[in-house]
Amino acid sequence: MMRFFILLSYNGSAFKGWQRQINGPSVQEHLEFAFSAYLREKVEITGAGRTDTGVHAINYVAHLDSCNDSLTKEQHLLLYKINAILPSGIVVYDICQVADSCHARFDAVSRTYKYYVHTKKDPFLNEFSCFFPYELDIEAMNRAAGMLLGERDFTSMAKLHTDVKNHICTVTRAEWQPLSPLNLTPLSEQPYTFCFTISANRFLRNMVRAIVGTLLEIGRGREREEWLLEVLNKRDRGSAGSSVSSHALFLNSIEYPYKTFQIN
């Protein structure tokens, strides 16, 4: 038996998240069907982590086990066939053999998410960006975001009643910058498309969306910058801002302590 890492991206709009669900289509379900159909064997695929309904992923990593040598000898044909079977919202870029002990989820040392917001009406952004029609103080939001760095308890930003052992995460990057998900540059004196980037060793369910909702309250001027620390210290989900919509959230990259795909 050989282990392989898979590199893929998906538009989460049509899926109930990464993980197989009984109430709707998932990315995992479609991948397992495509690989099973091509390899003519039952294939189980393990992802680097779950994403919720509507969340997108770029350069997502998963792994599978198989004895089929076409995974090493016919990769160009395999990628062509697999992508032909998959729906248009999922694309597999690469497959590489790794050590049997490698694990797509447990070996990941860092993950990066991006969340997009636009503050003016725009005909092209609504599919991948959250419309928030208020003037934002990006400098205040960045000062508050800096308070997220380091090892902290994110109970206040986590979905309630999940099966995690603790809510401790180590955040290494948290910042806002002018950026559009479609790389568009409108003829405007002031930027109105913004991206929040956050990297950490792990993320809790709903964590990024709750953080963004909390920072938007600060950017809008409804709360002080120091309010973020007060929210974290309360360890109470009800004290934070509302979660923003999932459609503007991207899992952007996953890092491992060893080399995987050649593009790394």
Image (cartoon, rainbow, N blue to C red):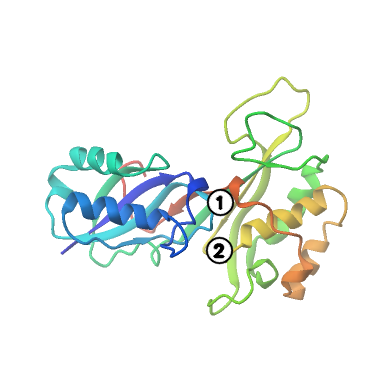
User: Could you say which is closer to the camera, residue 159 or residue 4?
Assistant: 159
The circle on residue 113 is 1
Residue 102 horizontal side relative to residue 14, left or right: left
Residue 155 horizontal side relative to residue 24, left or right: right
Q: Residue furthest bottom?
A: 165
Task: Name the quadrant of the C terminus.
Answer: top left
Residue 96 rendering spot, x and y as whole percentages: 25, 50
Determine the CA span between mark 2 and mark 1.
10 Å
Disc 1 crowd, CA 10 A, few/some/many (<14, 14-19, 20+): many
Q: Are marks 2 and 1 in contact (CB under 8 Å)?
A: yes
- Amino acid at the residue labelled 2: Phe
Residue 49 horizontal side relative to residue 154, left or right: left
Disc 2 crowd, CA 10 A, few/some/many (<14, 14-19, 20+): many
Q: Give the mark, 2 or 1, whose residue is nearer the N terminus.
A: 1
What residue would you read off at disc 2? 203
User: Could you say which is closer to the camera, residue 258 or residue 159?
Assistant: 159
- Amino acid at the residue labelled 1: Tyr
Task: Name the quadrant of the N terminus.
Answer: bottom left
